[in-house]
Image: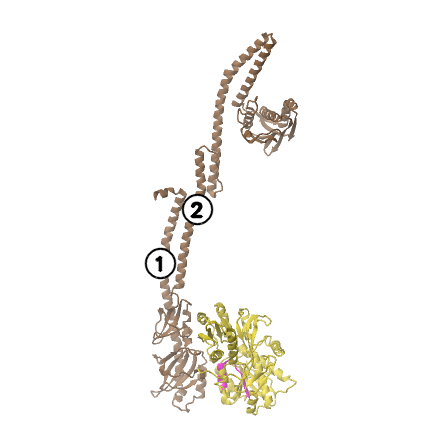
Amino acid sequence: MRFELQKLTLAKRYLWSGLIVALFPLVIMAVLYDRYSANLLDSLITNKVEGRLESVAVKMNNFISVHVKQLENIVDLPDTTRFFLDVNDGKLSGQLSDFLILETESPDIYSVEFSDTHGNVLRTIPSSKSRSKPLDHATLPIVQHKNVEILGPVLPSKGRPGWFLIRMPVYFNHEKIGQVALRTRLASLTEQAASLLEPNVYEPQVVIFDRIHISAVGTASFAGEILATSRQIMPGWRIHLVERGGRLDEPRVQIRYILLLVATLSTFGVVWLFIRMSQRLTSFLLPLSEGAQAISNGNFSLRVSENGPGELGILARSFNKMSSQLGAMIKSRVDVERRATLGNMAAGIAHEVRNPLATIVTTVHGLSYGESNPERQKMYQVISDEITRVDDTIGEFIKYAKPRKPSKEMVLIRDVFRSVRTLTAATAHDQNVVFNLLGDSALEVEIDHAHLRQILLNLTLNAIQALPDGGHVTLRTHRDGENAEISVTDNGIGLDNETRDKVLRPFFTTRVEGTGLGLSITSQLVEANNGKLDIESELAHGTTVKMIFPIRVTGQR
Amino acid sequence: MLVFGISQADEVLNVSSEDVVKVGCLYPLTGPGGLYGRDSAAAVKLAEEFLKFSETVKYPKLKIVIKDTRSKSFRSLQMAREFVESDNVDFLCGVVSSGIALTISQLAKEEQVFFVGTDHASPSLASEAWHPYYFRVNNGTRLSMLAGSKYIAENYRGRKGPLKIAFIGPDYDYGYQAWDDLQNFLKADDVNMEVVGEYWPKLFETDYTTYIQYLKNSNADIVVNGHWGLDLVTFVKQAKQFDLFKTMTFMNFDAGGNYEVLAELGNDMPLGLVLSARHHLNWPETKRNKNFVTRFYEKTGRYPSYAAQGAYSGILAIAEAVREAGGVSDKKLIRQKLEHLRLSLPEDPDGFQSHMDPKSHQMLQVQAIGKTIFDNRYPPATVQLGEWSVYYPPKTWPTKIIEK
């Protein structure tokens, strides 16, 4: 395990730690909240359902009470008593008949029935053949509710709706002489519970003596798991909330599950995000690590991608800059040390070689003056020339090793161009080379005059030497912002890439008689005058050496 | 000419000084079903116009009084009594609700006054509550259900397993009779069916949502609806909200295609419902029907519900019977003339005349059943019926009732 941990990058370790720290309380909170909300929901739902059941039970009681009152009004009419005393030969008085028609205009009441003490129906208002049967009230369930009897219910059948009777006896001199009943629409009672219906979850039922089950629309229903029960509306009559494919609290439970699902998805989302972040961070940090490794191996040329976001991008850019500067600094340091060594060596050579050479030359001159033999005089001359050539080479070497500090002044480039052309005119003419001087004739640059002349002279001579069969050498200058650009171009033999990369190294030469120091010194002089030198060349097409110098080094005009 | 004075909402039409036929009409001009009454009143005026300007036949003069019953049973009975006892009318006419019509018919029977029904449709009035003085000039639910049964038989016979039918209709005589008749005719037509639900919401109910839930749970193939007027409008609006029409085919053979319903629902009326009515604006495409619809529109600024054509027929029926009987003195003769009455009415297709069944006193008429299709020729309705199935009536009115 420890080994596995050690394999993790720091970024991954931080991210995984962060993830655990973030998720642990989240999971604990989710569990606690879920338990709390579940208990709260149970409590709320139970209270709410019981409250609604109670409310519906009260509404049903009121419904019955209203019709009991209506029935009392009919029973208490003198004409009702007269009807049972058979005063009008079994006919209802016109007034009573009209009153009953008015009472039955309510859609809750189908009819008013007058029956004898045995329950045999004598008259029905309004009369209707479709309601004439069944009238055998003796078979109906009966309960006593306060001062009335509730008969029924009769469930819907054969294309007729269900009903029940609210019946009240009629007394005369304390003797029961008949009964009046309201044939009441069953659905008018059950519809009071319609608000409790939750389709496909549970349905309210009016249940009578646990045997008869009636739906909210007054149709026969079937028993099921009872989720809640109201108090009695009338003796034996209750409202049940019956399960129908779902739990009582299902809609709320669904919301709870959805919340839990969202929390789980969020957790997975956070984990995924952390993994992605870890991978991405690693993809940016790993190249930096490899870059550092490369630097430790002395490779300063490796560059890392700078496309990282935010600080990572800044870090990559800083790393590249550091790598570049470190490389330049080490190169510069090596160069300085090399030159210091060369300088010491040059001083030694100057002292140990040039002085004896001077003595030798003087001696040879002395001998040549005293020599009459022309053959020997010629040999002395050859010795003298060779010693002079060696001295020149040593002079070049000393220049490279211990260059003179530039003494800058404003120099009209055009003048230097012309001077170089004059100096090289004879050589150019011999090799059939044509000079072109182009560019801004008024352009001046702050530079060491002698250095510039030597730079251009070296480059021009190199260019002429690159034109063995003649050609064109072009010196060109123009202003580029705060800089002056000077180029020397020939259309000669050109350089291959390998040669081009080496030509600035000291002692590198392609000519037998060359010292290999001309371009090195040129490059050194350009740098000493704050310039930059660049060589573009193509084999068989020619070479352009381009230099850029700041017009003003001091910033003053 | 209009005379006012009976009550604020009552109307007296065309008074003639000598030998007038007195007609007392009962319609709800306000409250539930008020549009039926107002359309009926307008159609009564159209009928009067027709009689007055008839060039070929001279009709007797009519004094027609319309009273606003407000769809109340006892109020209707009192007004009918006033007509009989105070105004000595020769004819009672109208009545939208079958429940109220049963009460009025009972009075007509007791008082031996003709009662010409123009709108209510329960078969009870022409069967168990029949009496010699009751005649009905509009198609009753029995003929609507006969046509509906044939439509179902034609479209569903031969399917595998029983056809599951649920019924929902208003909880009163009209609804019971319609459902009885449809079941009996389906049995007679040998349709293999299973009744999966019967529901009886109150007349003028405003919330059908609980019933719609139970209907949806019934898994019926067809739901036959027996509602009319605003009850039907409310039901369709709520059923559409609960996607009832996507799960089962909705049919209403008696009043579903009434223009009033189509106009009231407008864009809320779903397409593809199977409906019918006792009169249609766009069927039959006869000159007589077009004239009736156009004339009604010119008079009222709206298109007629089927109640208008019923009232129009009632007045024409009374005028024709009295004309043929030569006056109102001989009730027996008037009854005979009514029993053999033949009329050419707007709802009659070419080559057919509405005619009275002498035994039941029920007018026999053609019933056209259609499906709701887009048709905005009769605004504000945007839907009319089309794809018609037309059913001619039997030779005699089917009186046999299977005992419940």
The image quadrant where one finds the N terminus of chain B is bottom right
Looking at the image, which is closer to me, A61 or A261? A261
Q: Which chain can be seen in yellow?
A: B
Looking at the image, which is closer to me, A87 or B90? B90
Quarter of the figure with residue B267: bottom right
Highlighted range, magenta? B89-105
Q: Can the viewer see residue A24?
A: yes
Q: Which mark sits nearer the N-terminus, 1 or 2?
A: 1
- Callout 1 amino acid: Arg
- Which numbered circle lies on residue A35? 1
Q: In screen coordinates, is B34 left or right of A131?
A: right
Which residue is depicted at the point 49% across and 20% down? A345
Quarter of the figure with residue A280: top left
The image quadrant where one finds the C terminus of chain B is bottom left
Residue B158, given in percent of the width and then of the height, sits at: 49, 73
Helix, strand or loop for disc 2: helix
- Mark 2 belongs to which subunit? A
Q: Name the residue under label 2.
A: A277
Residue B219, given in percent of the width and then of the height, sits at: 45, 70
Q: Which chain can be seen in brown?
A: A
